[in-house]
């Protein structure tokens, strides 16, 4: 087995999974998350040197379990809040953005953070649940702050590169990643106003 080819298959399936997940096609998303996890498992067996490959497998399988629950909820309780499912999806988008952020993939991270912000804004406008609105606004504010910091950092680095030769080819991170503490809690936090007219990031093309 070719580990490199299996890795490519895994990430290709993961892209399709995330796309279907974003569009609310949960059954299709489950299929592709499973395929992505299986491809990475085989890649690991074949000697893949990809860092944190088992973490990615676990992440995909955990999302499969969450989506299974969502699908079952739709069958057994059709009136379960669609907004709550959207919150879960937005939270997963931020998780994916954080992964790209950690890898230094700025464009992909910005796009995922921005999509999470837009989903949160849309959902907050649809729900009348004040607790859910607070959670959505918290997540949107955190994701938007991080996206704007990344774009600002990239702009500064670009301007610096034009005026001086860089000492190293490695990207310089001037702001810290969003970090694992972006997860939601029930305690309202101060949030900055977020508007649907906020500028979008570039479209991302890989997970």
Image: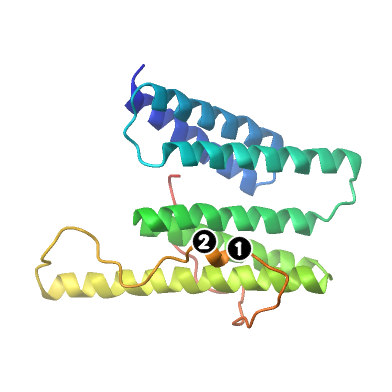
Say few, some or many: other residues with alpha carbon within 10 Å of mark 2 (under 14 / 14 to 19 / 20 or more): few
Q: Residue furthest top?
A: 1
Above or below, 104 against 7 in this view is below
The quarter of the picture where residue 187 lies is: bottom right
**SS label for mark 2:** helix
Answer yes or no: is residue 23 visible: yes
Dot 1 crowding, Cα within 10 Å, few <14, some 14–19, many 20+: few
Residue, x 58% and y 61% (percent of image)? 116
Location of residue 144 in the rendering, given as x and y in whole percent from the top left corner: 52, 71
Residue 79 - label: none
Q: Residue at x 51, y 57 (%)?
A: 112
Per the rendering, the mark at residue 180 is 2
Could you tell me which quadrant the C terminus lies in? top left
Q: Quadrant of the N terminus?
A: top left
Task: Give percent across and percent down for residue 84.
Answer: 76, 57
From the top left corner, tell me how far across and down residue 152 is, in percent: 36, 75
* Residue of label 1: 183
Q: Are marks 2 and 1 in contact (CB under 8 Å)?
A: yes
Asked which secondary structure carries label 1, the reply is loop
| Real-space Cα separation, disc 2 to disc 1, in angstroms | 7 Å
Scheme by which the image is coloured:
rainbow
Q: Is residue 133 above or below residue 40?
A: below
User: Can I make out residue 203 in this image?
Assistant: no
Which image quadrant for residue 175?
Answer: bottom left
- Left or right? Give the position of 145 relative to 133: left
Number of on-image labels? 2
**What residue sits 42% from the left and 37% below the top?**
53
The image quadrant that residue 203 belongs to is bottom left
Residue 99: x and y in percent read: 45, 53
Residue 113, compared with residue 3, is above or below; it is below
Residue drawn 44% across the image and 23% down it: 42
């Amino acid at each position: 087995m070719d580990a490199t080819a299996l890795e490519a298959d895994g990430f290709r399936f993961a892209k399709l999974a995330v796309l279907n997940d974003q569009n609310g096609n949960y059954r299709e998303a489950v299929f592709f998350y499973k395929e992505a996890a299986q491809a990475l498992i085989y890649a690991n067996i074949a000697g893949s040197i990809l860092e944190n490959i088992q973490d990615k497998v676990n992440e995909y399988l955990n999302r499969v379990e969450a989506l299974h629950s969502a699908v079952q909820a739709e069958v057994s309780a059709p009136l379960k809040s669609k907004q709550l499912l959207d919150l879960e999806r937005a939270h997963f988008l931020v998780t994916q953005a954080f992964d790209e952020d950690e890898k230094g993939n700025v464009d992909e991270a910005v796009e995922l953070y921005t999509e999470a912000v837009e989903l949160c804004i849309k959902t907050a406008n649809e729900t009348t649940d004040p607790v859910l609105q607070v959670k959505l606004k918290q997540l949107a504010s955190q994701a938007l702050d991080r996206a704007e910091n990344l774009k600002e950092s990239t702009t500064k680095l670009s301007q610096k590169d034009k005026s001086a030769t860089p000492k190293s080819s490695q990207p310089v991170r001037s702001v810290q990643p969003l970090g694992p503490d972006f997860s939601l809690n029930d305690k309202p936090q101060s949030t900055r106003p977020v508007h649907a007219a906020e500028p979008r990031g570039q479209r991302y093309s890989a997970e």
